Structures are given as structure tokens and as C-alpha cells.
Amino acid sequence: MTSVGIDAVEVWTGKLKLDLPNTFAPQKGDDPEKYTKGLGLEASSFPDTYEDIVTMGANAAKRLMDRKGLTPADIGRIDVATESAFDNSKPVSTYVAGCLEQVYDGDFHHANKGERKFACVAGTQSIDDAYNWIAAGRNRGLAALVIATDTALYARDSSGEATQGAGAVAMLIDEDPNLVELSHEQGYGSADETDFLKPQQQFPSVDGKRSMQVYLARMREAVEDLEAQLDEPLHPEDFVYVPFHTPFPGMVRKAGLLGYRHILRDTDIEDEVAEEIGRQPREESFDDRESYEEAIQSYMDELKRTEQYRSWYDATIEPTLNISRQVGNWYTGSVHIARASALQAAAEAGRALTGERMLVASYGSGAQAEVHAETVCDGWREEIGALTIDEQLQRRYDLSFEEYERVHDAHNHDLDTEVEEFTQPSGEFVHAGWGRMNERKYEYVE
Ligand code: CAA
């Protein structure tokens, strides 16, 4: 089979910024370090009044199509992953296609369109769907456009408010990809959970602390499922980066430690750290689960201070968090900006990555984790060098707290609030009003 994977990626951030330590924390009476050190966040991206999941997704897709010189005739499939959809029937991909058809010759009438839902893991599931479509030879030589787009807004004064974000990632899935090749090495951890959900409501109901436990439990299951299919056990040095779903970097700090501890077992590195902190506890040596878990917890407290763990974390995890720290949670797009962030850091450091493998760890509440291995392709440096995320982040309008509250209200579907835009759209799609059947209307602003 020919190689299939992500050929190109583009990112569109919401055009507003909420500074968490300097603007948000003082209003909430919080220590700014709760955000910078605890959650690991500097800022959230917010959508301006004319932005939504369609405009951000279409703008990221247009940038990708322009850069790759694509026309609608080159695309056989458009899948949008989102947990911020506003229509239970008409998929966001039809709106996105409608936007793109305003600016390109030709149309997407031949393209299969859909919308994927499983909280934040849906972006990765859409890539899987596209991969399967190509691998099955049903793509007629065409590529798939996968768009992960979300406005991750929480109710004001709820605990999740600190981890909001908004943005879109567009990815081209194709044969002989330039960026990363996908593999069959994949594991799942999935269970019926009620940790984070939106039962016919715009803002989520969240059991915050429990959602973190569920994230870790499903992630561990997914790694075990992957391991069960491999000939060799996993080793911490197998992967150059491990991009995780990143609701906030502090969550990945926990997941990284758990994952490292798990794949450390029976390796040469476990022997090395054993000289300092002993070997990790084995469940079979304990009479009950509770005492085993206590022993594991104290082992992990010591493990995180070892040189071996700290250098693994700094090299393998830390570079995946650079963009997330500045934008907050992008739900379906989050793990994909973690991958982009790592590749961008590698390019800046002049590293040679072609042929190296990454373990991508996706997660969606409700809940499902998926881990898979992918290999960096030889066009990665040029692809990632074309990202304009740094300029986009710098151009964001820095909101005052009172402006933040107004724009939050403007996006609240239950309120009818007129708020002036904060930025001027230029060369992008905007939400321009409502149609006769209450559908959203979009136009391209030159
Ligand atoms: N200096 C340094 N650290 C500080 C600090 C200070 N002054 N003050 C607090 N901290 C630390 C805390 O110790 C804590 O770290 P640890 O967990 O390592 O102990 C961290 O900062 C956060 O502080 P709190 O636990 O007090 O924060 P909180 O109670 O306000 O809420 C949250 C945290 C529950 C994650 C909340 O933000 C939330 O509900 N978020 C939405 C749900 C979510 O993102 N869940 C993640 C898993 S589910 C998922 O991944 C899917 C998804 O995208 C939603």
C-alpha cells in the first residue's frame, strides 16, 4: 500500500486574546501562578463577533488550499470535527464548502461531506476516516480535507472558564504525504462516562476533577491496547515527541508522568532510575489495590524528580505545549496543534526528524482515548515552516476583562447582545447574518 498521512496543516486562531495571569486572574481573585504554573496557560484565544466554527474552519482551509495550489476538483471528501456545532442536521462541512465555493472556481458537489462527533477525539477520528477511505482505494486519486474547529467556551464563573479557547486546524490527508505518515499501530480506551457533556446546551456541564481522572484512565487503557498488539514492548526512547490532547498543559504534565511510568517498566531506564528510587511497585506484590496505588503514587512523586524523567519530559513533551499555552483548549484541534507545536520547535532548533516516530495521544470526554504512531516525512520542515501561527498570535486583540465579558455574551446563544467587532476582517470569511430558515450566512471580505 502507498503511504497515507497528513500532507499539510494550517491553523486559524480566534482573533481575540484573553490574558489569563494579567487580565483574568485579578478579576477572579486568583494568584496568576495558578494559570501560568498550575494550569500552564498564558492566554486564551477568543472568536471576534464575526467569527465562529465555520469562519475559522473555512479560513484555515482556504489558507491550506491556496498554499498547496488546490482547487475543489482536488478534494473528494470534507470532514469537520467539532463539539461546538449549531445544527443537529446540516453538517458544518456544508457551510465550509459553501464558503470556499464563493472564492474558488468549481465546486465541491462531488465531495463526500460529514461531521464527526466524539468530543475532542473527533478530529483524530476524522483523520482515521480519511485514511481508511484512501487506504481502501475509494478516493479516486483525490485528497481529503479534515477540519477540526471549535469555540471552546464555558459558562462564566464556571471552573472550566480558565481553559477556554477558539480556533481551527485544517489538514490535508493524502497519499505520499509531506508531513507525517500514519500507521496501523493504534490503541483505544473507551467507556461510557459522564465527565463532560453538552446535552442540547451550548456550554458544557463538567465534573472537572473527575474529567481529569477519566482522561488518565482511558489514556492508560489505550496504551495497554496498543501494547497488546506490538511484538516488542514500548520504550520511552521509541518516540521523538508525544503530542497529547491538551485541554491545558497541566493535564499533559500528569498524563506524561503516568505514560512514562507505564512504559518504563522492565526497561534499561527502569534499572538506571532504580539505583536512585528503587524499582516501581508491581501489583502482584500487594494484597489489595489500595496499597498498590499508594505505593505507585509515592513512586511517581519520586520519579518526576529524576534526571531521566525530567530530560525525557523536556525533550518529548514540553515542545508540544508551546502553542497551547498561548491559545487554551481548542477541543478537536488541540492534539493537532500539539503535533504542530512540536514540529515547529524541532524546525526552529534545526533538528533532523525525517523517519522519526511520534506517538499521538488523542482524547475525547464521554470518553475515549486513542493512541497511534506516526512517522515524520521528508517534507516536514517546509510544511511546518509555512505555518503563520506566531504572527497570528501576535496580531490578536488583547481584551480587557469588561470586553471579554461582552464578547462572551455576544457568543452566548441564549442572549441577544449587539457588540461591535474588535478587529477588522480582511481577506477572510465572516459570519454576515441569518437566512430565511435561520441558517447562518457567510461572506468573504477582501
Ligand atoms: N501556583 C502554582 N500552582 C497553583 C496555584 C499557584 N498559586 N494555584 C493552583 N495551582 C495548581 C493546583 O495545585 C492545580 O494543580 P494540580 O492539579 O497539579 O494540583 C492547578 O493549579 C489547577 O488548580 P485547581 O485544581 O485549583 O483549579 P480549578 O479547581 O479551578 O480547576 C479544572 C481545574 C478542574 C481542570 C478546571 O479548569 C476545569 O473544569 N476545566 C475543564 C475540564 C477539563 O479541561 N478537564 C480536563 C480533562 S477532560 C478533557 O481533556 C476534555 C476537554 O478538552 C474538556
Image (tube, helix red, strand yellow):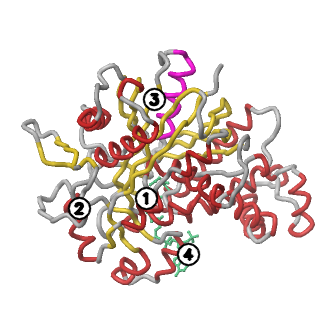
Q: Circle 4 — which element? A: helix
Give the alpha-carbon distance from disc 2 to disc 4, as whole Å. 34 Å
Q: Above or below — where is 25 with respect to 364? A: below
Q: Which mark is residue 144?
A: 3
Please give the name of the residue rendered at 53% of the width and 49% of the height, measured from the top-left corner. 335
Give the main secondary structure, helix, strand or loop, of the magenta stretch. Answer: helix
Q: Which residue is mark 4?
A: 37
Q: Amino acid at mark 4?
A: Lys
Q: Quadrant of residue 83?
A: top left
Foreground mark, 2 or 4, reads: 2
Q: Which residues are magenta?
A: 123-137
Q: Above or below — where is 239 with respect to 398? A: above
Give the alpha-carbon distance from disc 1 to disc 4, as whole Å. 22 Å
Q: Which residue is mark 1?
A: 207
Please give the name of the residue rendered at 51% of the width and 52% of the height, measured from the top-left corner. 337
Query: Which is nearer the N-term, disc 3 or disc 1?
Result: 3
Q: Is 384 left or right of 317, judged from the image as shown? A: left
Q: Quadrant of residue 144?
A: top left
Query: Which is nearer the N-term, disc 4 or disc 3?
Result: 4
Q: Circle 2 — which element? A: loop
For ligand 1, tell me if the residue under mark 4 lies within 8 Å: yes
Please give the name of the residue rendered at 58% of the width and 46% of the height, measured from the top-left corner. 382
Q: Circle 3 — which element? A: strand
Q: Nearer the viewer, residue 288 or 261?
A: 261
Q: Circle 1 — which element? A: loop
Give the alpha-carbon distance from disc 3 to disc 1, as whole Å. 36 Å
Query: Mark 3 and 1 residues: CB-CB less than 8 Å, in contact?
Result: no
Q: Which mark is residue 424?
A: 2
Foreground mark, 3 or 2, reads: 2
Query: Mark 1 and 2 residues: CB-CB less than 8 Å, in contact?
Result: no
